[in-house]
Image: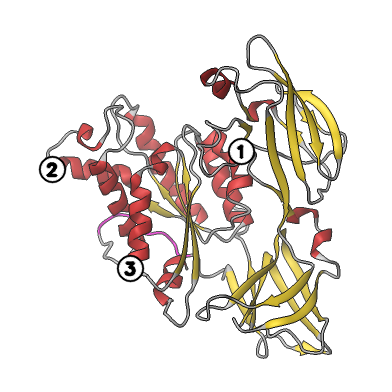
Amino acid sequence: RTMTLLRASTAQKRNKVRVLIYGQSLSKQSWAGRVRDELARRYPTADLEFYNRSIGGFISSMLVRTIEHDVMPLYPDLVILHDYGTEEPYEEIIRQIRTRTTAEIMIQTDPITPGQKLSWHDAHAQWMRGLAERWQLELVDIRGIWSAYLEQQKISVDKLLLADKGHLNDWGNFIWAEATLQRLLPTSRAGDGYEATPNTASRPVKDFVVGTDVKWVDNVLRVPFLGNRVDVLSPPDAKGAAAQVLIDGKPPSQFPQLYMFTRPNADANRDWPWATGAVIRVDAKAPLVLEDWTVTFTSVDPSGKIFGFDVRGSVTGWDGSGDTSSPFQSRSGRVSFTPSDWFLDRVHGRNANRIGPGYNVTFSVVPQFKDTFIEGGCVEADRLCSTTLAQGLPVGAHTLELVNLNATKPGISAVRVYRPMEDRK
Protein backbone atom coordinates (compact mmCIF):
# COMPACT_ATOMS: atom_id res chain seq x y z
CA ARG A 1 0.00 0.00 0.00
CA THR A 2 2.81 2.43 0.88
CA MET A 3 4.59 2.02 -2.43
CA THR A 4 1.31 2.10 -4.37
CA LEU A 5 0.52 5.48 -2.82
CA LEU A 6 3.97 6.79 -3.76
CA ARG A 7 3.82 5.49 -7.33
CA ALA A 8 0.25 6.72 -7.88
CA SER A 9 1.02 10.29 -6.81
CA THR A 10 0.81 12.94 -9.51
CA ALA A 11 1.18 16.70 -9.67
CA GLN A 12 -2.62 16.90 -9.64
CA LYS A 13 -3.07 14.34 -6.84
CA ARG A 14 -0.35 14.30 -4.21
CA ASN A 15 -0.79 11.30 -1.92
CA LYS A 16 0.42 11.73 1.64
CA VAL A 17 2.75 8.95 2.80
CA ARG A 18 4.15 8.85 6.33
CA VAL A 19 7.28 6.72 6.94
CA LEU A 20 8.84 6.08 10.36
CA ILE A 21 12.35 4.71 10.94
CA TYR A 22 12.49 3.11 14.38
CA GLY A 23 15.07 1.19 16.36
CA GLN A 24 18.34 2.09 18.06
CA SER A 25 21.63 3.71 17.02
CA LEU A 26 22.10 1.70 13.81
CA SER A 27 18.78 3.09 12.60
CA LYS A 28 19.96 6.64 13.26
CA GLN A 29 22.84 6.29 10.78
CA SER A 30 23.02 7.75 7.28
CA TRP A 31 21.46 4.77 5.47
CA ALA A 32 18.07 6.03 6.67
CA GLY A 33 18.68 9.41 5.05
CA ARG A 34 19.74 7.70 1.83
CA VAL A 35 16.44 5.80 1.76
CA ARG A 36 14.49 8.99 2.41
CA ASP A 37 16.32 10.92 -0.29
CA GLU A 38 15.91 8.18 -2.90
CA LEU A 39 12.17 7.87 -2.27
CA ALA A 40 11.82 11.66 -2.50
CA ARG A 41 13.82 11.69 -5.74
CA ARG A 42 11.85 8.90 -7.38
CA TYR A 43 8.44 10.13 -6.27
CA PRO A 44 8.69 13.96 -6.27
CA THR A 45 4.94 14.46 -6.50
CA ALA A 46 4.21 12.43 -3.37
CA ASP A 47 3.63 14.27 -0.09
CA LEU A 48 6.30 12.26 1.76
CA GLU A 49 6.62 12.69 5.52
CA PHE A 50 9.73 10.96 6.87
CA TYR A 51 10.41 10.58 10.60
CA ASN A 52 13.29 8.98 12.48
CA ARG A 53 12.54 8.45 16.17
CA SER A 54 15.18 5.80 16.81
CA ILE A 55 16.77 5.81 20.27
CA GLY A 56 20.41 4.87 20.77
CA GLY A 57 20.97 1.88 23.04
CA PHE A 58 17.28 0.96 23.33
CA ILE A 59 17.02 -2.79 22.83
CA SER A 60 13.61 -4.39 22.32
CA SER A 61 12.78 -4.59 26.05
CA MET A 62 13.21 -0.79 26.24
CA LEU A 63 11.79 0.15 22.84
CA VAL A 64 8.57 -1.68 23.63
CA ARG A 65 8.02 0.93 26.34
CA THR A 66 8.49 3.97 24.07
CA ILE A 67 6.20 2.97 21.18
CA GLU A 68 3.21 4.36 23.09
CA HIS A 69 4.55 7.91 22.71
CA ASP A 70 6.52 7.52 19.46
CA VAL A 71 4.51 5.31 17.12
CA MET A 72 0.83 5.21 18.09
CA PRO A 73 0.13 8.96 17.88
CA LEU A 74 2.03 9.22 14.57
CA TYR A 75 0.01 6.38 12.99
CA PRO A 76 2.48 5.94 10.08
CA ASP A 77 1.87 4.21 6.77
CA LEU A 78 5.17 2.33 7.00
CA VAL A 79 7.54 1.49 9.87
CA ILE A 80 11.08 0.39 9.03
CA LEU A 81 12.43 -1.36 12.11
CA HIS A 82 15.76 -2.75 13.22
CA ASP A 83 16.40 -3.50 16.88
CA TYR A 84 18.56 -5.82 18.93
CA GLY A 85 17.25 -7.62 21.98
CA THR A 86 15.21 -10.65 22.97
CA GLU A 87 12.36 -12.01 20.91
CA GLU A 88 9.39 -11.70 23.26
CA PRO A 89 9.46 -7.87 23.54
CA TYR A 90 10.44 -7.63 19.87
CA GLU A 91 7.28 -9.44 18.84
CA GLU A 92 5.29 -7.33 21.29
CA ILE A 93 6.48 -4.22 19.43
CA ILE A 94 5.20 -5.77 16.20
CA ARG A 95 1.93 -6.86 17.80
CA GLN A 96 1.21 -3.43 19.24
CA ILE A 97 1.87 -1.62 15.96
CA ARG A 98 -0.04 -4.15 13.85
CA THR A 99 -3.15 -4.35 16.07
CA ARG A 100 -3.37 -0.64 16.92
CA THR A 101 -2.44 0.99 13.59
CA THR A 102 -2.66 0.06 9.92
CA ALA A 103 1.08 0.66 9.45
CA GLU A 104 2.91 -1.74 7.19
CA ILE A 105 6.16 -2.92 8.76
CA MET A 106 9.54 -3.70 7.26
CA ILE A 107 11.95 -5.51 9.59
CA GLN A 108 15.70 -5.95 9.11
CA THR A 109 17.85 -8.81 10.38
CA ASP A 110 21.03 -8.10 12.35
CA PRO A 111 24.31 -7.38 10.57
CA ILE A 112 27.40 -9.51 11.20
CA THR A 113 29.80 -7.83 13.62
CA PRO A 114 33.05 -8.98 15.29
CA GLY A 115 32.59 -10.72 18.64
CA GLN A 116 28.96 -11.50 17.92
CA LYS A 117 27.44 -14.80 19.06
CA LEU A 118 26.85 -15.98 15.51
CA SER A 119 24.64 -18.97 16.35
CA TRP A 120 22.11 -16.85 18.27
CA HIS A 121 21.88 -14.14 15.61
CA ASP A 122 21.59 -16.74 12.84
CA ALA A 123 18.74 -18.44 14.71
CA HIS A 124 17.19 -15.02 15.42
CA ALA A 125 17.22 -14.23 11.69
CA GLN A 126 15.37 -17.49 11.02
CA TRP A 127 12.88 -16.63 13.78
CA MET A 128 12.30 -13.28 12.07
CA ARG A 129 11.27 -15.08 8.88
CA GLY A 130 8.52 -16.82 10.82
CA LEU A 131 7.58 -13.53 12.46
CA ALA A 132 7.30 -11.88 9.03
CA GLU A 133 4.97 -14.62 7.80
CA ARG A 134 2.86 -14.54 10.96
CA TRP A 135 2.36 -10.77 10.98
CA GLN A 136 2.59 -10.09 7.22
CA LEU A 137 5.80 -8.09 7.38
CA GLU A 138 8.42 -7.28 4.76
CA LEU A 139 11.82 -8.76 5.62
CA VAL A 140 15.19 -7.29 4.64
CA ASP A 141 17.78 -9.99 5.27
CA ILE A 142 20.69 -7.67 6.05
CA ARG A 143 22.57 -10.59 7.54
CA GLY A 144 22.34 -12.77 4.46
CA ILE A 145 23.07 -9.88 2.11
CA TRP A 146 26.17 -8.87 4.09
CA SER A 147 27.43 -12.45 4.20
CA ALA A 148 27.06 -12.85 0.43
CA TYR A 149 28.61 -9.46 -0.26
CA LEU A 150 31.63 -10.11 1.96
CA GLU A 151 32.26 -13.41 0.21
CA GLN A 152 31.80 -11.90 -3.23
CA GLN A 153 34.15 -8.96 -2.54
CA LYS A 154 36.65 -11.09 -0.58
CA ILE A 155 36.70 -8.58 2.30
CA SER A 156 36.30 -8.79 6.07
CA VAL A 157 33.28 -7.33 7.83
CA ASP A 158 35.56 -4.65 9.37
CA LYS A 159 35.54 -2.93 5.98
CA LEU A 160 31.85 -2.03 6.50
CA LEU A 161 32.18 -0.83 10.10
CA LEU A 162 33.53 2.06 12.08
CA ALA A 163 36.42 1.61 14.50
CA ASP A 164 33.97 0.67 17.29
CA LYS A 165 33.13 -2.50 15.28
CA GLY A 166 29.42 -2.02 15.97
CA HIS A 167 28.33 0.87 13.75
CA LEU A 168 28.37 1.38 10.00
CA ASN A 169 30.91 3.37 8.01
CA ASP A 170 29.97 4.99 4.67
CA TRP A 171 30.42 1.71 2.83
CA GLY A 172 28.25 -0.17 5.32
CA ASN A 173 25.58 2.54 5.20
CA PHE A 174 25.53 2.31 1.40
CA ILE A 175 25.02 -1.47 1.45
CA TRP A 176 22.31 -1.21 4.14
CA ALA A 177 20.45 1.49 2.20
CA GLU A 178 20.64 -0.44 -1.07
CA ALA A 179 19.36 -3.62 0.60
CA THR A 180 16.41 -1.68 2.03
CA LEU A 181 15.59 0.08 -1.23
CA GLN A 182 15.66 -3.18 -3.15
CA ARG A 183 12.78 -4.41 -0.97
CA LEU A 184 10.84 -1.17 -1.47
CA LEU A 185 11.35 -0.34 -5.12
CA PRO A 186 10.03 -2.37 -8.08
CA THR A 187 12.71 -4.93 -8.88
CA SER A 188 13.21 -8.61 -9.56
CA ARG A 189 13.34 -10.66 -6.37
CA ALA A 190 13.82 -14.09 -7.91
CA GLY A 191 16.07 -16.35 -5.94
CA ASP A 192 16.16 -14.38 -2.70
CA GLY A 193 14.28 -17.15 -0.89
CA TYR A 194 11.62 -15.00 0.69
CA GLU A 195 8.43 -13.26 -0.37
CA ALA A 196 6.29 -11.32 2.10
CA THR A 197 2.54 -11.86 1.95
CA PRO A 198 0.84 -8.63 0.81
CA ASN A 199 -1.77 -7.34 3.24
CA THR A 200 -4.58 -6.88 0.74
CA ALA A 201 -7.38 -9.17 1.83
CA SER A 202 -8.26 -7.21 4.97
CA ARG A 203 -8.33 -3.82 3.15
CA PRO A 204 -6.83 -1.99 6.12
CA VAL A 205 -7.63 1.48 4.73
CA LYS A 206 -10.90 2.04 2.90
CA ASP A 207 -12.61 5.11 1.46
CA PHE A 208 -16.40 5.51 1.53
CA VAL A 209 -17.24 7.91 -1.29
CA VAL A 210 -19.92 10.43 -0.34
CA GLY A 211 -22.81 10.29 -2.79
CA THR A 212 -22.00 6.73 -3.84
CA ASP A 213 -21.13 4.57 -0.83
CA VAL A 214 -22.71 6.83 1.79
CA LYS A 215 -25.14 9.76 1.51
CA TRP A 216 -26.42 12.71 3.49
CA VAL A 217 -29.92 12.04 4.83
CA ASP A 218 -31.76 14.89 6.55
CA ASN A 219 -28.54 16.78 7.31
CA VAL A 220 -26.83 13.69 8.73
CA LEU A 221 -24.03 11.69 7.10
CA ARG A 222 -24.02 8.26 8.73
CA VAL A 223 -21.15 5.79 8.17
CA PRO A 224 -20.96 2.40 9.92
CA PHE A 225 -17.37 1.16 9.90
CA LEU A 226 -14.90 -1.35 11.33
CA GLY A 227 -11.64 0.02 12.68
CA ASN A 228 -10.05 2.43 15.14
CA ARG A 229 -9.53 5.60 13.08
CA VAL A 230 -11.74 7.69 10.83
CA ASP A 231 -10.81 10.68 8.63
CA VAL A 232 -12.80 12.90 6.30
CA LEU A 233 -11.51 14.10 2.93
CA SER A 234 -12.70 17.35 1.42
CA PRO A 235 -11.74 19.54 -1.56
CA PRO A 236 -9.05 22.19 -0.98
CA ASP A 237 -11.47 25.04 -1.68
CA ALA A 238 -14.14 23.83 0.78
CA LYS A 239 -14.31 26.34 3.62
CA GLY A 240 -16.67 27.42 6.36
CA ALA A 241 -19.15 24.56 6.64
CA ALA A 242 -19.28 22.66 9.92
CA ALA A 243 -20.67 19.47 11.39
CA GLN A 244 -21.02 17.95 14.83
CA VAL A 245 -19.08 14.68 15.13
CA LEU A 246 -20.64 11.71 16.88
CA ILE A 247 -19.23 8.20 17.17
CA ASP A 248 -21.58 5.56 18.52
CA GLY A 249 -23.92 8.39 19.47
CA LYS A 250 -21.47 10.44 21.55
CA PRO A 251 -18.76 13.05 20.96
CA PRO A 252 -15.30 11.53 20.38
CA SER A 253 -13.98 13.41 23.43
CA GLN A 254 -15.95 10.98 25.59
CA PHE A 255 -13.71 8.08 24.51
CA PRO A 256 -10.81 7.86 27.01
CA GLN A 257 -8.65 6.03 24.44
CA LEU A 258 -8.46 9.17 22.29
CA TYR A 259 -6.21 11.08 24.72
CA MET A 260 -2.46 10.51 24.42
CA PHE A 261 0.67 11.58 26.27
CA THR A 262 3.48 13.26 24.37
CA ARG A 263 7.09 12.09 24.67
CA PRO A 264 8.33 13.49 28.03
CA ASN A 265 10.99 16.21 27.73
CA ALA A 266 10.88 15.99 23.95
CA ASP A 267 13.47 18.26 22.35
CA ALA A 268 14.14 18.21 18.61
CA ASN A 269 17.58 19.69 19.18
CA ARG A 270 18.81 17.20 21.80
CA ASP A 271 19.26 13.43 21.82
CA TRP A 272 16.30 11.94 23.70
CA PRO A 273 16.44 10.76 26.42
CA TRP A 274 20.24 10.66 26.74
CA ALA A 275 20.70 14.41 26.72
CA THR A 276 17.36 15.45 28.21
CA GLY A 277 16.70 13.10 31.12
CA ALA A 278 13.13 11.84 31.30
CA VAL A 279 10.74 9.08 32.13
CA ILE A 280 10.39 7.11 28.90
CA ARG A 281 6.81 5.97 29.50
CA VAL A 282 3.82 7.63 31.17
CA ASP A 283 0.65 5.65 31.84
CA ALA A 284 -2.72 6.49 33.35
CA LYS A 285 -5.21 4.57 35.49
CA ALA A 286 -8.05 7.09 35.07
CA PRO A 287 -9.54 9.02 32.12
CA LEU A 288 -7.40 11.94 31.01
CA VAL A 289 -8.16 15.59 30.30
CA LEU A 290 -6.27 17.90 27.96
CA GLU A 291 -3.54 19.51 30.03
CA ASP A 292 0.20 19.99 30.54
CA TRP A 293 2.05 18.06 33.24
CA THR A 294 5.20 18.92 35.16
CA VAL A 295 7.26 16.60 37.35
CA THR A 296 9.51 18.74 39.56
CA PHE A 297 12.40 17.09 41.38
CA THR A 298 12.55 18.00 45.04
CA SER A 299 15.51 15.92 46.23
CA VAL A 300 18.27 13.53 45.18
CA ASP A 301 19.87 10.91 47.39
CA PRO A 302 23.69 10.74 47.88
CA SER A 303 24.03 8.08 45.17
CA GLY A 304 22.54 10.46 42.61
CA LYS A 305 20.21 7.70 41.42
CA ILE A 306 16.99 8.25 43.39
CA PHE A 307 15.05 11.46 42.86
CA GLY A 308 12.09 12.71 44.85
CA PHE A 309 9.43 14.64 42.93
CA ASP A 310 6.10 16.46 42.93
CA VAL A 311 3.59 16.03 40.11
CA ARG A 312 1.30 18.84 38.93
CA GLY A 313 -1.17 19.14 36.06
CA SER A 314 -2.25 22.45 34.56
CA VAL A 315 -5.90 21.42 35.06
CA THR A 316 -5.62 18.78 37.78
CA GLY A 317 -3.28 20.80 40.01
CA TRP A 318 -0.92 19.20 42.52
CA ASP A 319 -1.41 15.46 42.15
CA GLY A 320 1.00 13.80 44.54
CA SER A 321 4.64 13.16 45.43
CA GLY A 322 6.91 10.17 45.01
CA ASP A 323 10.39 9.05 44.08
CA THR A 324 11.96 7.29 41.14
CA SER A 325 12.71 4.08 43.05
CA SER A 326 9.05 3.18 43.63
CA PRO A 327 5.94 2.74 41.48
CA PHE A 328 3.96 5.97 41.41
CA GLN A 329 0.31 6.66 40.80
CA SER A 330 -1.01 10.19 41.15
CA ARG A 331 -3.95 10.99 43.40
CA SER A 332 -6.26 11.47 40.40
CA GLY A 333 -4.96 8.33 38.68
CA ARG A 334 -4.11 10.41 35.61
CA VAL A 335 -0.35 9.80 35.83
CA SER A 336 1.62 6.69 36.73
CA PHE A 337 5.30 5.76 36.43
CA THR A 338 7.25 2.51 36.69
CA PRO A 339 10.72 2.74 38.33
CA SER A 340 12.47 1.01 35.42
CA ASP A 341 11.18 3.66 33.00
CA TRP A 342 13.16 6.52 34.56
CA PHE A 343 16.18 7.48 32.46
CA LEU A 344 18.03 9.87 34.75
CA ASP A 345 21.02 8.40 36.52
CA ARG A 346 23.13 8.10 33.36
CA VAL A 347 22.33 11.68 32.41
CA HIS A 348 23.06 12.85 35.94
CA GLY A 349 26.36 11.01 36.00
CA ARG A 350 27.50 12.64 32.77
CA ASN A 351 26.30 16.09 33.71
CA ALA A 352 27.09 16.51 37.39
CA ASN A 353 24.73 18.86 39.23
CA ARG A 354 22.57 19.43 36.15
CA ILE A 355 19.78 17.18 37.43
CA GLY A 356 18.71 17.88 40.96
CA PRO A 357 16.08 19.78 42.96
CA GLY A 358 14.19 22.11 40.67
CA TYR A 359 14.74 20.02 37.53
CA ASN A 360 11.54 19.49 35.52
CA VAL A 361 10.23 16.72 33.32
CA THR A 362 7.31 17.95 31.21
CA PHE A 363 4.75 16.29 28.96
CA SER A 364 1.22 16.95 27.75
CA VAL A 365 -2.04 15.19 27.08
CA VAL A 366 -3.07 15.85 23.48
CA PRO A 367 -6.31 15.06 21.63
CA GLN A 368 -6.64 12.43 18.94
CA PHE A 369 -10.15 13.61 18.10
CA LYS A 370 -12.42 16.45 16.95
CA ASP A 371 -15.89 16.97 18.34
CA THR A 372 -16.66 19.47 15.58
CA PHE A 373 -15.50 19.29 11.98
CA ILE A 374 -14.96 22.70 10.38
CA GLU A 375 -13.89 22.97 6.76
CA GLY A 376 -10.69 24.99 6.68
CA GLY A 377 -9.50 24.44 3.14
CA CYS A 378 -5.93 23.56 2.18
CA VAL A 379 -2.99 25.72 1.20
CA GLU A 380 -2.14 23.40 -1.68
CA ALA A 381 -4.71 22.95 -4.42
CA ASP A 382 -3.21 19.61 -5.54
CA ARG A 383 -4.38 17.47 -2.64
CA LEU A 384 -7.52 16.69 -0.68
CA CYS A 385 -7.81 18.13 2.80
CA SER A 386 -7.64 15.28 5.29
CA THR A 387 -8.97 15.72 8.83
CA THR A 388 -8.74 13.01 11.48
CA LEU A 389 -11.94 12.88 13.52
CA ALA A 390 -10.92 10.04 15.84
CA GLN A 391 -7.73 7.97 16.18
CA GLY A 392 -7.23 5.25 18.76
CA LEU A 393 -10.77 3.97 19.15
CA PRO A 394 -11.28 0.44 20.45
CA VAL A 395 -10.84 -1.69 17.33
CA GLY A 396 -14.24 -2.92 16.21
CA ALA A 397 -17.62 -1.85 14.87
CA HIS A 398 -18.52 1.83 15.17
CA THR A 399 -20.88 4.32 13.59
CA LEU A 400 -19.79 7.81 12.57
CA GLU A 401 -22.44 10.52 12.33
CA LEU A 402 -21.76 13.99 10.97
CA VAL A 403 -24.59 16.38 11.80
CA ASN A 404 -24.66 19.48 9.60
CA LEU A 405 -24.58 22.72 11.62
CA ASN A 406 -25.00 25.29 8.81
CA ALA A 407 -27.29 26.04 5.91
CA THR A 408 -24.75 24.44 3.57
CA LYS A 409 -23.50 20.91 4.14
CA PRO A 410 -19.75 20.28 4.32
CA GLY A 411 -18.31 19.36 0.93
CA ILE A 412 -16.89 16.05 2.14
CA SER A 413 -15.84 13.84 -0.75
CA ALA A 414 -15.02 10.67 1.21
CA VAL A 415 -14.79 9.14 4.65
CA ARG A 416 -11.61 7.12 5.16
CA VAL A 417 -11.52 4.37 7.79
CA TYR A 418 -8.53 2.47 9.14
CA ARG A 419 -8.82 -1.14 10.29
CA PRO A 420 -5.76 -2.66 12.03
CA MET A 421 -4.93 -6.34 11.82
CA GLU A 422 -6.54 -8.80 14.18
CA ASP A 423 -4.32 -10.09 16.97
CA ARG A 424 -2.33 -13.18 15.93
CA LYS A 425 -0.45 -13.93 19.11
Name the residue rendered at 63%, 23% in the picture.
355
Q: Main secondary structure of the magenta part?
A: loop
- Please state the extent of the stretch shown in magenta in the rendering: 191-198
Q: Amino acid at mark 1?
A: Arg
The secondary structure type at the circle numbered 3 is helix
Q: Could you tell which of marks 1 and 3 lies nearer the N-terminus?
A: 3
Q: From the viewer's perspective, tell me whether residue 370 is left or right of residue 203.
A: right
Q: Amino acid at mark 3?
A: Arg
Q: CA distance from mark 1 to mark 2?
A: 40 Å
Q: CA distance from mark 1 to mark 3?
A: 35 Å
Relative to 282, residue 341 above or below: above
Q: Amino acid at mark 2?
A: Gln
Circle 1 is placed at which residue position? 65
Which quarter of the picture shows residue 338? top right
Name the residue rendered at 84%, 44% in the picture.
286
Circle 3 is placed at which residue position? 42
Tell me if residue 140 can be seen.
no
Relative to 179, residue 343 above or below: above
Residue 368's spot in the image, x, y percent?
71, 59
Q: From the viewer's perspective, tell me whether residue 56 is left or right of residue 283.
A: left
Circle 2 is placed at which residue position? 153
Residue 276's spot in the image, x, y percent?
57, 33
Residue 20's spot in the image, x, y percent?
49, 53
Relative to 235, residue 364 above or below: above
